[in-house]
Image (spheres, rainbow, N blue to C red):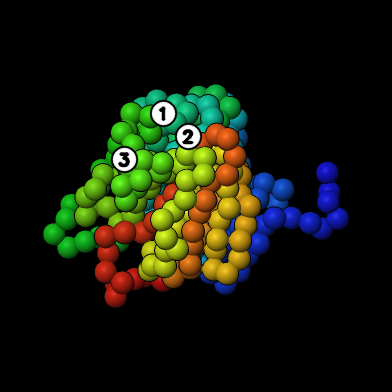
């Protein structure tokens, strides 16, 4: 229902909160029987693009624009000939492996140009399952578990993780750093501080945090909160392509 112009969404110089009531769907070039909710891209100030792809059975993504990370939220994909169910993911290094829905499917997609590091081979295609990765306490706090979905390898110029917070758990500090983030709330709810603003957030929300945006999160509610989070990584700031 229309709420007379009210929304939790907000776009500031160094951050974005994109809530489902403001989502606009549009196909991207090459998509077939699929559509995208573009959460963030270079036009908004980011050096990457992140969107939610919604597929009909048999739907497919178009050509990628560099490396691509796909995380299945609901349904099942065939990626490069490998089955990727909900909770699974695939890394595509720019080889244009087909991404085809085996059923009605929703997936988080992150795309960015690859920044090669001298002396390191380019990463290769692989798939994985978030549930098969052991959660590790974040900075020693067992109330916050991190699962690294990409290898800890300098060949990768980005990291994608899930973070799971028990009710009442928080980040231990307000972070300010050169990396930018794309964050998709997967479950639960909480409060996010972005710059000098405080936002209630819940499953389905997307957040972009630009470089040096002050950021902090605390989980609320009676069930765990989980989000998927991207950051640029393993490259010197003087080589920044922005």
Q: Earlier in the sequence, mark 3 or mark 2?
A: 2
When the figure is inspected, residue 125 is found, relative to residue 7, above or below; the finding is above
Quick one: label 3, few (<14), some, or many (20+) residues within 10 Å? some
Q: What residue do we see at 54% from left, 30% from top?
A: 74
Quarter of the picture containing the C terminus is bottom left
Residue 127: in sight, yes or no?
Answer: no
In space, the residues marked 3 and 2 are separated at their CA atoms by 22 Å
State the image quarter where residue 178 is shown: bottom left
Q: Position of residue 182 (x, y in %)?
A: 48, 54
Indicate whether 47 appears above or below 108. below
The residue where tag 2 is placed is: 72
Q: Position of residue 102 (x, y in %)?
A: 50, 24
Do we see residue 198 in this rendering? Answer: yes
Residue at left 31%, top 33%? 134
Q: Nearer the viewer, mark 1 or mark 3?
A: 3
Secondary element at tag 2: strand
Residue occupying the point 55% across, 34% down:
223
Position of residue 87 measured from the top left corner of the image (x, y, whole percent): 44, 31
- Which of the two marks, 3 or 2, is nearer to us in this view? 3
| Between 157 and 123, the one nearer to me in the picture | 157
Q: Observer-nearest residue: 192 or 115?
A: 192
Q: Are marks 1 and 3 in contact (CB under 8 Å)?
A: no
Identify residue for label 1.
84
Of residues 168 and 188, the one drawn nearer to the viewer in this rendering:
168
For mark 3, what is the residue?
136
Q: Earlier in the sequence, mark 2 or mark 1?
A: 2
Residue plotted at (42% across, 67% down): 176
């Amino acid at each position: 229902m229309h709420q007379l112009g009210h929304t939790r969404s907000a776009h500031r110089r160094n951050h974005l909160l994109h809530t489902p009531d403001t989502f606009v769907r549009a196909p991207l070039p090459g998509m077939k029987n699929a559509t995208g909710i573009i959460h963030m891209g270079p036009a908004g100030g980011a050096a990457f693009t992140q969107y939610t792809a919604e597929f009909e059975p048999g739907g497919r993504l178009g050509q990628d624009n560099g490396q691509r990370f796909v995380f299945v939220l609901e349904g099942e994909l065939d990626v490069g000939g490998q089955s990727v169910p909900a909770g699974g993911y695939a890394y595509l290094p720019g080889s244009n492996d087909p991404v085809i829905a085996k059923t009605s499917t929703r997936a988080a997609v992150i795309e960015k140009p690859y920044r090669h590091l001298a002396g390191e081979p380019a990463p290769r295609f692989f798939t994985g399952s978030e549930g098969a990765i052991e959660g590790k306490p974040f900075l020693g706090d067992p109330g916050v578990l991190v699962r690294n979905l990409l290898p800890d390898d300098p060949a990768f110029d980005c990291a994608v993780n899930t973070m799971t917070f028990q009710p009442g758990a928080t980040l231990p500090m307000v972070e300010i750093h050169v990396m930018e983030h794309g964050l998709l709330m997967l479950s639960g709810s909480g409060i996010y501080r972005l710059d000098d603003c405080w936002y209630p957030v819940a499953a389905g929300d997307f957040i972009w945090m630009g470089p040096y945006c002050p950021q902090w999160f605390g989980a609320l509610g009676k069930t765990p909160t989980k989000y998927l989070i991207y950051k640029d990584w393993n490259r010197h700031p003087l080589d920044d392509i922005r």
